[in-house]
Image (tube, rainbow, N blue to C red):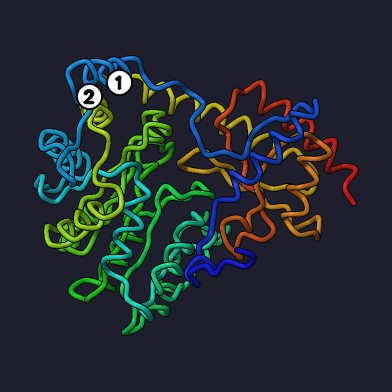
Amino acid sequence: MANPRYAKRMDVCGTETAFEMLAKARALEAQGKHVVHLEIGEPDFDTPAYIKNAAIKALNAGYTHYTPAAGIAQVRETVAEYVSKTRNIPVDPDEVVVTPGAKPIMSFVMLALVDEGDEVIYPNPGYPIYESMINFTGGTPVPIPLKEELDFRLDVEELAQKITPKTRLIVLNSPHNPTGGILSRKDLERLAELIEGKDIFVLSDEIYSRIIYDGEHISLASLPGMKEQVIILDGFSKTYAMTGWRLGYGVMKKELASKVTKLQVNFTSCSAAFVQMAGMEALKGPQDDVEKMVQEFRRRRDVIVHGLNGIPGVTCTLPKGAFYAFPNVKSFKRPAKEIADYLLNEAGVAVLSGTAFGTFGEGYLRLSYANSVENIQEALRRIKESLARFS
């Protein structure tokens, strides 16, 4: 077949530039170049031993078969208890859907809620799959810019101007990828005023809720009257260094949970049984490893932000959560992608252009500090030397 025809929807299906940059970096490494990796949003810690042991125990106990599509009953009960405790809201196990990774919650919710022409408001710069899935489902993407002068918090009053009768879904992400910004209680209270009682859902991406340095994590679902309109997206990848395990979950009203479960039946059947059992143990077991990881991320954050602010032409705000720095490189008056490519090829440092997260990311770079302090310091040295020659 010379010229196969593909579905038109594939033309609007996006990707994650982090994996493309990783491939470029690996190609350079194969040629003998040493590269410091600051592009991938993945904890560099190992999954805690008690979680791995729980998976081994589950495998030996025969957890190798299909499970109910929404998840094993006792796993959903554990998730419900955990979310009830951490968000201070009552959660029924029937409001929980366990998925292979948290990303399916994003996709399934949009497929269940968004018809062609419905508007979805989402943060920009933001996780690129938001916009990709809005387009893929036929929705109309409505970006809300995150601004450095607001510490990359959502400007709720600007968002208010974007709400129309066609608004079906609002996407929140706090702590935020790629900026590390966090929504305040005041921001969330104002948003609640804007949408309460309206036919608008909020997808609250809280995957970084445990990786927070300043203030506290507040879920919109915790505010009075909001639980019915909020879908909490969370998972195990970031908090427990379980990226390769592929385990996440959504918490939402029962009617929507049943529709998301139906989509899971069609797309994935269920999450792996032994992985679900490991995830249950992650939530029930000791949390010392999580606390140690966050402390180390805080140390790395301080090193990388201080170092970036010491590079002529670069400024960087202090992220309050997640594990990303989002430095401003506008003074170089060159496209951010060009700067990112230059740093990879000339300095051997893999970073991402802010535009990998949307058009409003122009003028910024994203650096993941999920790497050792020694490697971060070496990257900073290389960046400083290379940018001094950049023209």
Query: Up-down: is 236 above or below 257?
Result: above
Crowd class of label 2 (few under 14; some 14 to 19; many from 20; radius 10 Å):
some
Q: Count the labels in the image.
A: 2
Q: In the rendered view, does 159 fall on the left or right side of 298?
A: left
User: Mark 2 — residue?
Assistant: 281
Residue at x 29%, y 47% (from the top left corner): 268
Amino acid tagged 2: Glu
Most distant residue in the front direction: 1
Mark sitting on residue 382: none
The quarter of the image holding the N terminus is bottom right
x and y, in percent, of residue 274 in the image? 25, 27
Mark sitting on residue 51: 1
- Give the SS element for disc 1: helix
Residue at x 46%, y 50% (from the top left corner): 176
- Give the SS element for disc 2: helix
Amino acid tagged 1: Ile
Q: In the rendered view, does 372 fall on the left or right side of 121?
A: right
Query: Up-down: is 265 above or below 112?
Result: above
- Residue 264 appears in the picture as rendered: yes
Of labels 2 and 1, earlier in sequence is 1
Q: Say which quarter of the image contains residue 46.
A: top left
Label 2–label 1 contact, CB within 8 A: yes
- Residue 85 appears in the picture as rendered: no
Q: Say which quarter of the image contains residue 166.
A: bottom left
